[in-house]
Image (spheres, helix red, strand yellow):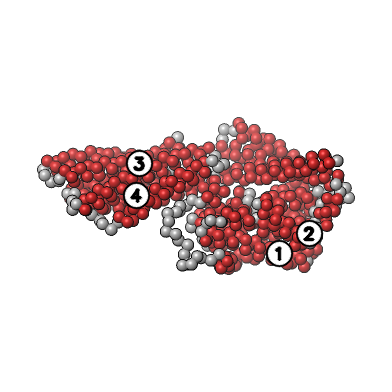
């Protein structure tokens, strides 16, 4: 007897683990199938609240976790990609999107065919596809079916083990049926979800328990009990975002609070009528969903989140206002630290690796812009003898070095996550790219030192020398624009123009050397200015080479 009970407990735990793994596995491969669409959707989040809700639904349907979506949003607010109001609407949509898991789980209760058997077969087919298919997308779709199959197999193990347990230990049903207190049921939902950190998993367990009956044909869990636990699970899921927001800036913490406020207020909106008319609401769910209790719970979960979103969507700004009152600015009214920081990357975005890949590219483009800006400052110092840019130059150089270190560290983390082979190949090329950009900054620093020395020693290049330097710089500007277009779009359309400009810069370096010798023979320049002029030409040619390396990284990656 004891051995049988322990065996069934082990099977139930194994089924739960298989269910959770299946959800994560399917969500990860849905992300891969979506490719860069998740980031494109999030980039389209505007002040249109309906669009924000729709995007939140779509992203969460792919990620299969409203908590993961919210954590990602906290990261985006932390880097300034989204405002709190924009994130709030996406959070509302995420709460609706997460109910799709309960609807999938409730399919198990369809009596027209054996859903578990069908998805188990699909999982087998998917496994074969993931092994032998040549097309990447076919392999990814195969893994999606594998995840679905694992979800239903996990549910089958859980259902079978719970059925045996209540047959062997009938008092289990009595214990569950004895828990009638709504507040206690609500707390069970909150605590259990906070521990598992997945409202989808808790709702799935509730559906399994409600769908399992004793020998007396009595469900282990009733509809009313399930509704209260489901309400609690919506609050418990907030713990993930709250923990993730620790250590972030004030607006990111406020975003996590908005998630909590939305779910707590939404729970109250439904809880009060449920406490007053629980029997009437239960009858309405039966009338809407039929006699199948699993469908009743799944539909309640969906309707509850849709109703709450409709009620609170007009008050998005009010939620933001409340969050700013709860999480206040530090004294002085600002959260700025004056320190270097990443513009597009945040550890929280690693929750969705496919989005993080695109964010790395954006951060590298930002780094390249800083390096070229310093190159421009250095050339102006050389040619125009500017003396008021040194401070900005040094700050930018520090930021370039900071980005070089931080992006490299981020690349290590993201490559270790679950991303496809092509993205790993792309990210591997980024190590060389950020090194090339950092070297551009270093050569710009050399040019700045030449300019500072010439100003201090009251030296000047000849007018012809200045024109030659500016011509090379203008070619470099055109080269930079073509290279960054190539890097951003991953298109090789401009490679012929890039090669042509590189040849012009190489030729200009040779001509500058010849022109320098002529001016030196004519006594038009001094050995000191001549040496710096040749070093300038050499450094500018090296900068162009490193720019071309960035474009070549795309060519190598596309090969």
Neighbour class for label 1 at 10 Å: few (<14), some, many (≥20)? some
Along the polypeptide, which appears first: circle 3 or circle 4? 4
Residue under the point 21% across and 53% down = 456
Q: Label 4 to label 2, Cα distance in Å?
A: 64 Å
- Residue 469's place in the image compared with 425, above or below, is below
Spatial CA distance of label 3 from label 4 is 12 Å
Q: Are marks 3 and 4 in contact (CB under 8 Å)?
A: no
Q: Decide if residue 341 is on the left or right side of residue 172.
A: left
First of labels 1, 4 by sequence position: 1
Is 554 located above or below residue 317 in the figure? above
Residue to which mark 4 is pinned: 372
Give the CA separation, mark 1 to mark 4: 56 Å
Residue at 72% over, 54% down? 298
Mark 1 touches mark 2? (CB < 8 Å): no
> In this figure, which residue is indicated by the disc labeled 1?
270
Which residue is label 3 attached to? 546
The answer to whether residue 166 shows anywhere in this view is yes
Circle 2 sits on which residue? 224
How many neighbours does mark 2 have within 10 angstroms: few (below 14), some (14-19), or many (20 or more)? some
Q: CA distance from mark 3 to mark 1?
A: 61 Å
Which element is circle 2 on?
helix
């Amino acid at each position: 007897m004891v051995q049988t009970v322990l065996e069934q407990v082990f099977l139930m735990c194994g089924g739960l683990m298989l269910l959770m793994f299946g959800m994560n596995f399917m969500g990860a491969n849905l992300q891969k199938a979506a490719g860069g669409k998740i980031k494109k959707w999030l980039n389209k989040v505007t002040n249109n609240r309906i669009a924000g809700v729709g995007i939140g639904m779509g992203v969460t349907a792919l990620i299969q976790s409203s908590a993961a979506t919210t954590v990602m949003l906290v990261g985006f607010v932390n880097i300034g990609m989204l405002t709190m109001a924009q994130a709030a609407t996406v959070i509302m949509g995420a709460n609706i999107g997460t109910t799709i898991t309960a609807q999938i789980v409730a399919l198990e209760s369809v009596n027209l065919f054996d859903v578990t058997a069908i998805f188990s077969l699909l999982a087998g087919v998917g496994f074969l596809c993931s092994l032998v298919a040549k097309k990447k997308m076919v392999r990814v779709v195969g893994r999606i079916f594998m995840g679905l199959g694992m979800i239903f197999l996990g549910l089958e193990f859980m259902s079978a083990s719970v059925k045996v347990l209540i047959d062997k230990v009938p008092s289990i049903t009595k214990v569950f049926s004895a828990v009638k207190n709504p507040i206690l049921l609500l707390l069970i939902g909150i605590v259990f979800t906070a521990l598992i950190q997945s409202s989808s998993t808790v709702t799935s367990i509730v559906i399994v328990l409600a769908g399992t009956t004793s020998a007396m044909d009595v469900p282990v869990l009733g509809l009313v009990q399930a509704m209260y636990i489901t309400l609690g699970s919506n609050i418990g899921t907030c713990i993930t975002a709250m923990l993730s927001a620790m250590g972030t800036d004030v607006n990111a913490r406020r975003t996590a609070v908005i998630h909590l406020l939305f779910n707590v207020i939404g729970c109250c909106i439904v809880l009060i009528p449920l406490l007053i008319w629980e029997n009437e609401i239960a009858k309405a769910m039966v009338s809407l969903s039929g006699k199948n209790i699993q469908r009743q719970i799944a539909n309640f979960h969906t309707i509850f989140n849709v109703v709450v979103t409709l009620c609170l969507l007009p008050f998005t700004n009010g939620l933001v206002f409340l969050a700013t009152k709860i999480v206040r600015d530090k004294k002085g009214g600002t959260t700025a630290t004056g320190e270097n920081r990443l513009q597009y990357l945040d550890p929280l975005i690693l929750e969705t690796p496919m989005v993080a890949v695109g964010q790395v590219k954006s951060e590298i483009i930002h780094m390249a812009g800083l390096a070229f800006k310093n190159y421009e400052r250095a050339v102006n110092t050389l040619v125009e003898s500017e003396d008021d840019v040194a401070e900005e130059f040094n700050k930018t150089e520090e930021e370039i070095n900071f980005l070089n270190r931080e992006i490299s560290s981020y690349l290590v983390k993201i490559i270790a996550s679950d991303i496809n082979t092509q993205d790993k190949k792309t990210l591997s090329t980024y190590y060389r790219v950020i090194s090339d950009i950092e070297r551009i900054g270093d050569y710009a620093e050399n040019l700045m030192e030449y300019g500072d020395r010439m100003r201090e020693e009251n030296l000047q290049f000849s007018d012809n020398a200045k024109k030659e330097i500016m011509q090379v710089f203008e070619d470099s500007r055109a080269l930079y624009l073509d290279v960054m277009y190539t890097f951003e779009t991953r298109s090789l359309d401009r490679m012929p123009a890039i090669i042509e400009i590189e040849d012009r810069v190489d030729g200009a370096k040779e001509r500058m050397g010849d022109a320098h010798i002529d001016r030196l023979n004519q006594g038009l320049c001094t050995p000191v200015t001549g040496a710096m002029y040749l070093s300038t030409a050499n450094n500018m040619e090296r900068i162009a080479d490193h720019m071309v390396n960035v474009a070549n990284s795309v060519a190598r990656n596309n090969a």
